[in-house]
Amino acid sequence: MENEKNLIEIRNLKKYFNTPRGQLHAVDNVTMDIEKGKTIGVVGESGCGKSTLGKTLMRLHSATSGSVMYKDVDIAAMPLKEFKKNYRADIQMIFQDPYASLDPRMSVLQLVEEPISVNDPKLSKADVEKKAKEMMELVGLAKRLEGSYPHELDGGRRQRIGIARALSLDPQFIVCDEPVSALDVSIQAQILNLLQDLQKERGLTYMFITHDMSVVKHISDDIAVMYLGQLIEKCPADEIFENTIHPYSQALLSAIPIPDLHIKRERMIMKGELTSPINPKPCCRFAARCPFATDKCHSEEPTLREMKPNHQVACHYAEKFMK
Amino acid sequence: MSEKLLDVKNLVVHYETDEEVVEAVNGVSFSLNKGEIMGLVGETGAGKTTTALAIMGLLPDRVANVIEGSIEWEGEDMLKMSKAQMRQVRGKKISMIFQDPMTALNPTIPVGEQIAEVVMLHEKCSRVEAMKRAQDMLAMVGIVPERYKEYPHQFSGGMKQRIVIAIALACEPDLLIADEPTTALDVTIQAQILDMMRNLQKQQGTSIILITHDLGVVAEMCDHCAVMYAGEIVEHGTVEDIFDNPKHPYTKALYESIPSLDKKVDRLHVIQGMVSDPTCLPTYCSFADRCEECTEACKQGDPTTVHLEGEHTVKCFKYCGKE
């Protein structure tokens, strides 16, 4: 590892999908450090590659090229079998839709037991059950729910099952893919608090993927903004609302409605929609929608540059937008 | 004095199945003037959509029962209208935008035809005139009229939602009911859609009922706001009343449970317990079991709606006798 503080170092990670119309660049040259015990928030519009990035780290997709260093080994390059044997338990995922990610025919206890017995077949039935019950208690699922089925529970409880399943293998790193976007605000608050408590107790590292900027600011230490498969800005969470540099990040932030009548912000309405990620031209991906775009933006791809300590931006004119 | 368009009085709607009775809406009253935008907020199951469907006369026939109350449209009770009369109102005077634009459009009919269909039905005009009108509508929502003959799958989510809005507005309705119109969309697209709705309201004087769970959207769009809980309006007032001077404990708790963009909070406030089961609502205040300010009186009976200053009303014992 280049830096002791980092749990994961992503270098030039690419994930391309082949489609009939050409190569779809879902994740394109992402380089990012994830610090141990911290939460990195990943934001962007739908289709910007944030979920694909999470799934590639999990090896649910295999990377096209690039490396993901974890404990001094490249987990993106090793054979899948080896990854599953040695590292799958360390890196877990919480999925967006607790309605779709649970088997409707399994009871709550069975659902929590499943990953435990699958990952350690030698464990006795009694031990599996004991561990599963511990996990249920940890995430706040009452004992009486052990025999219930997912359809009998509300979204918040279902998401707790998802969290219990992910935690049951004592992971180091959890990819949370929109874990609260299907939930009501009052339930959302419960789940966010639970995730924060678990992080403190167990020293977990999270990658928190979401499109909700207020949630991401609340839970993250660092925020990464993605646009069409590329990382365009990464900075500490406090910084993003004060000193955003990239025009896309600014536009994204200005689009969020704020539940306060006295804060009026000037809105940057972006023209048009996301351009196609299939065989993109070598230029700034945001140029087509950017109000400040010049000829250079349309012909040359900007690289990620460190503008301030801990604050990286991929824009040719980052200096101009710095406050 | 502005003209009263819609007047809902003491509306009670139950869904009845063989096993149980779901008390979805329990005594909702509100009125709407011409050109006003009213927000209807609340969590899943609060009865927002049922209220909207009752106004549209689209409640499912066999299971839903309007137990009592009236819905007056320009002085005439719509609940007493025949189906044929309602068809005249629906689409022409009152239109609704449904939550999910992906399922609201017919996948086998070109989008332009779907707009023209509504126009022909209500305006008794020729096919050519209807087509012309449909093309104008497409242009108004920012889609080039040349795409008239394209099918829904050829459009993105934001564009489909704009087409749904074009259909709803094709006959220049007096009232538009928008049920979570932007929930499925990205914030940047949401900003475009909200801007468009606001412009339409200004140009055509359309009244809007905006159903949402996003308080930010309400703050940005609405004049009035009603907060629903367990089928009742627990607080109603101008947005200034609701945002700057919330009275009901539920409204206050809602604010505290959303992560803020400008304040740093370590832990989010959590509303204890669950939403009451609509099949067996308590005979006392339905929020009492989760309320932090609950007193003895709250568990004795149901509070009445108390009128505070101006149009601000609240349904809570704390304010009873303080009118």
Image (spheres, coloured by chain):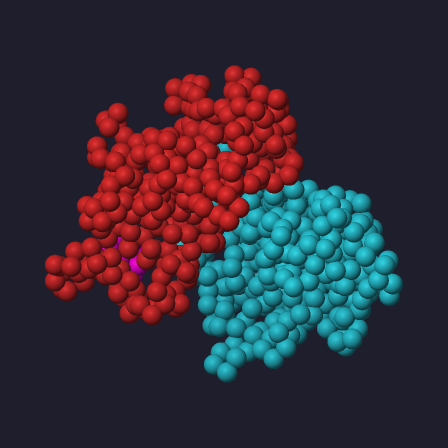
Chain colours: A red, B cyan
Which region is colored magenta? A134-142
Q: Position of residue A97 (x, y in %)?
A: 42, 56
The residue at 30%/32% (across/down) is A9
Residue A135 covered by magenta stretch? yes
Q: Quadrant of the N terminus of chain A?
A: top left
Counting from the top left corner in percent of width and height, residue B203 is at: 80, 45
Residue furthest top as drawn: A319
B131 horizontally vs A193: left or right: right
> A167 or B112: nearer the eye?
B112
Residue A99 part of the magenta-drawn span: no
The answer to whether A179 appears left or right of B220 in the picture is: left
Q: Position of residue A8 (x, y in %)?
A: 29, 34
Q: Residue furthest bottom?
A: B18
Query: At 56% across and 68% down in the image, what residue appears?
Result: B24
- The number of callouts visible is 0
Residue at 50% from the left image edge and 69% from the top image edge: B278
Q: Residue B122 sits in which quadrant?
A: bottom right
